[in-house]
Image (cartoon, rainbow, N blue to C red):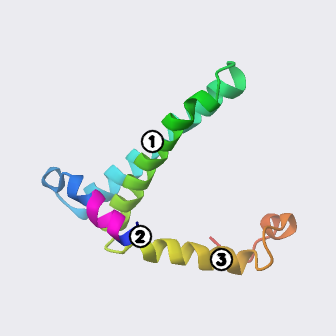
Amino acid sequence: MDADKYQELAMRTANFDAYDSYLDVLMNSALGLCGESGEIADIVKKARFQGHDLEAEREHIIKELGDVAWYVALGATAVGVRLSTILEMNVDKLQTRYPNGFDTERSQHRAEGDI
């Protein structure tokens, strides 16, 4: 499935009646990303520091990553851009930042304005 088709299908499950403005949509996206990322972080924390079996949580992690994708699609919708555009812009940024692949020196000394 391509990113734009995912965004279209995922947004069928968004409750746009609950929002008063695009800011509400963006806020739900931002807070949802924090929550879902936190769930993944908690799984990893428990595996690293509490002896939980990370492999046994693989399916759970995959589902939480799907929830992260949903909130990214919601954020893209909030700002009126296709998800594919965000992905393309991110790859372009990374290729500019790391033209030959990841480089620690370039990571530590990024160009001014590189966000």
Q: Which residue is mark 1?
A: 63
Whole-percent x and y of residue 105? 87, 67
Image quadrant of residue 84? bottom left
Whole-percent x and y of residue 103? 83, 68
- Asked whether disc 2 touches disc 3, contact meaning CB atoms under 8 Å apart, the reply is no
Q: Is residue 77 above or below residue 29?
A: below
Q: Nearer the viewer, residue 16 or 70?
A: 70
Residue 23 appearing in the image: no
The C terminus appears in which quarter of the rendering?
Answer: bottom right
Write the start and end of the magenta stretch as one range: 5-10
Q: Secondary structure at mark 2?
A: loop
The amino acid at mark 1 is Lys
Image quadrant of residue 104? bottom right
Report how far apart the C-alphas of labels 2 and 1 lie in the structure.
18 Å
Q: Which residue is mark 3?
A: 113
* Label annotation for residue 2: 2
Q: Does the magenta stretch mainly form a helix, a strand or a loop?
A: helix
